[in-house]
Image (cartoon, helix red, strand yellow):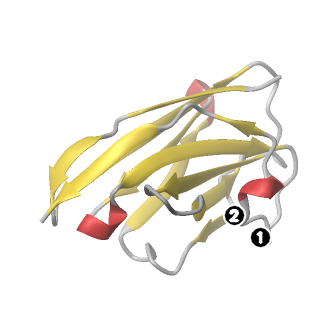
């Protein structure tokens, strides 16, 4: 079992920044494990945002956030971060982190992940 706990959400004005954290526990993590960030706005599907393998050497981003969001990890803390800059109102959503045991650049669907956190709300005002 893997437990994931997100934090760092909140209300910010357009153009502002937030950093989300995802603390993972419950197993020994390996280089091939993968953590992704997804977001879900009301009435919409859960969409891929970014992903990283546990070693940090491979990352992947949705086109809508490239150049604005950065995913990173701190292995000593078993924590993955999502730094969000230049936020837009359309970034408003509940943000979830998710875990899968193997890395794949094609893993961009919520169906590709096995474990999920409870989510953290991000609201961007115009």
Q: Nearer the viewer, residue 28 or 19?
A: 19
Above or below residue 49? Residue 119 is above
Position of residue 9 measured from the top left corner of the image (x, y, whole percent): 33, 39
Specify the farthest residue to the top.
Answer: 26
Above or below residue 125? Residue 105 is below
Using a 10 Å C-alpha cutoff, classify the residue at mark 2 as few (fewer than 14 neighbours), some (14 to 19) or many (20 or more).
Answer: some
Specify the farthest residue to the front.
Answer: 43
Which residue is depicted at the point 82% across and 57% down? 103
Position of residue 81 measured from the top left corner of the image (x, y, whole percent): 48, 44
Using a 10 Å C-alpha cutoff, classify the residue at mark 1 as few (fewer than 14 neighbours), some (14 to 19) or many (20 or more).
Answer: few
Position of residue 89 measured from the top left corner of the image (x, y, whole percent): 24, 66
Which residue is depicted at the point 81% across and 22% down? 27
Q: Quadrant of residue 85?
A: bottom left
Read off the residue under disc 1: 105
Question: Taking the image as drawn, is residue 88 in sight?
Answer: no
Position of residue 55 measured from the top left corner of the image (x, y, whole percent): 71, 48
Q: Quadrant of residue 4?
A: top right
Query: Disc 2 or 1, which lies upstream in sequence?
Result: 2
Read off the residue under disc 2: 58
Q: Nearer the viewer, residue 53 or 87?
A: 87
Disc 2 to disc 1: CB gap under 8 Å: yes
Above or below residue 62? Residue 116 is above
Query: Is residue 89 shown left or right of residue 46?
Result: left
Q: The residue tagged with tag 1: helix, strand or loop? A: loop
Assign the N terminus to one quadrant of the image: top right
Which residue is depicted at the point 55% across and 74% down? 62
Q: CA distance from mark 2 to mark 1?
A: 9 Å
Question: Taking the image as drawn, is residue 109 in sight?
Answer: yes
Which residue is depicted at the point 35% across and 70% down? 68
Of tags 2 and 1, the one toward the viewer is 1
Query: Is residue 56 shown left or right of residue 41?
Result: right
Assign the C terminus to one quadrant of the image: bottom left
């Amino acid at each position: 079992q893997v437990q994931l706990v997100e934090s760092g959400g909140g209300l910010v004005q357009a153009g502002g920044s937030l950093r989300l954290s995802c603390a993972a526990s419950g197993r020994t993590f390996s280089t091939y494990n993968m953590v992704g960030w997804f977001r879900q706005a009301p009435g919409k599907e859960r969409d891929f945002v970014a992903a990283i393998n546990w070693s940090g050497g491979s990352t992947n981003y949705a086109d809508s956030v490239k150049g604005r969001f950065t995913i990173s990890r701190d292995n000593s803390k078993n924590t993955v971060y999502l730094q969000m800059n230049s936020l837009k109102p359309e970034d408003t959503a509940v943000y979830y982190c998710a875990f899968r045991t193997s890395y794949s650049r094609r893993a961009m669907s919520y169906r590709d992940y096995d474990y999920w956190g409870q989510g953290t709300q991000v609201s961007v005002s115009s």
